[in-house]
Amino acid sequence: MKNIFITITLVIVSTFLSEHVFAQAKKPTIMIIPSSTWCEKNKFKKVFDNQGNKEEVDDYESAFNKSTELQQVITKISSFFRDRGYPAERMDQVIKDLKSQEAEDLLTTSKTGSTLSESPLDKLKKVAKTDIIVTIDWQIIENGPFLQVNYNSIGLDAYTNKQIADATKVGQPNAAASVPLLLETAVLANMDNLLASLQAHFDDLRLNGREIILEIRKFESFNGDLETEFDGKELNQIIENWVSKNTKGNSFSLKDATESIMNFNQVRIPFYDENGKALDARSWANDLRKYLKNTYKIDSKILTRGLGSARIIIGEK
């Protein structure tokens, strides 16, 4: 009987501890934004100059300033996430923070004028520094006195833009409810499944590392190329060895490698550095830049796009 009692006690304690640890598990930070489809339907678009190419992009600032409905919807959905313990960035505050940095970050150039353009969404990601972006789109269908909402949301990894979750719902017709209330009903019907998918992805990132892209280029002014030898090793081999040693589980893919370029993708970087500071593509790539400078006296410059893409240009700062 004594052994049975001890066994039962251990099971109960183990179950309690497991549930407690799960409850205390770190949760991803989230930012809610309108989808490109919603921006298109509501004519919130502007032209973006991407390194000389004109592209039409979502105009989040105008959308948030001019659409009261968007403000109400994002506020409501953000509160759902926060109520469930998921930190949700306020989009209006992120836009304000972005505007305050815009003068400083308006143009990123090297001494020879090289640039790496960023879209408005890339800039939002860098300011918010969230783990996951949730895009929302909705359409109100009128049928006489009744309103019905068609709602769709997609979860995206903020570093890679890869889709990691989705939720779609056509709400019940209602003659009295406001748009935010109609959306609340539709969102709640899908919230558990959506959160489960987002959390599973985030848990995988914490276990196996964040995924980023790393590009290596060289300035024309560089006296050599990526096949030039330093201490008996080609520069491309030096870089690949560093990437291998500094990725989580040596996980990366070298997509292209020539005398002038190296393209790494599916690069899994640690969540935190040795000091406990969160890593993104820029901070991680900066360690490679410092390694090349300190070990081989090679100058280089870092350019970034969003949180998950870094380019190191060899040859000057």
Image: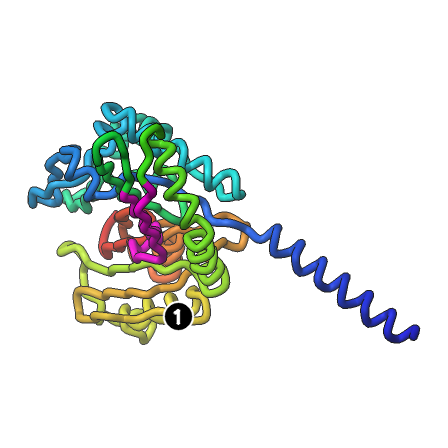
Quadrant position of residue 138 = top left
Using the rendered image of the protein, determine whether residue 94 is visible from the camera's viewpoint: no
Q: Quadrant of the N terminus?
A: bottom right
- From this view, report whether residue 258 is shown above or below residue 197: below
Quadrant position of residue 312 = bottom left
**Residue at the spot x=39%, y=43% of the render?**
187
Query: What's the magenta bit mostly, secondary-structure-wise?
Result: strand
User: On the rendered structure, is 175 left or right of 116?
Assistant: right
**Residue at the spot x=33%, y=35% of the render?**
174
Measured from the top left, where is residue 12 in percent x and y?
76, 63
- From this view, report whether residue 246 is shown above or below residue 124: below
Measured from the top left, where is residue 277 in percent x and y?
50, 48
Q: Looking at the picture, tell me which residue is in the foreground, 219 or 269.
A: 269
- From this view, report whether residue 121 is shown above or below residue 60: below
**Residue at the spot x=41%, y=53% of the render?**
194
Three-letter amino acid code at the position of disc 1: Ser
Q: Looking at the picture, tell me which residue is in the foreground, 240 or 81.
A: 81
Residue receiving disc 1 = 251
Measured from the top left, where is residue 222 in percent x and y?
18, 57
Residue range of the region highlighted in magenta in the rendering: 150-172
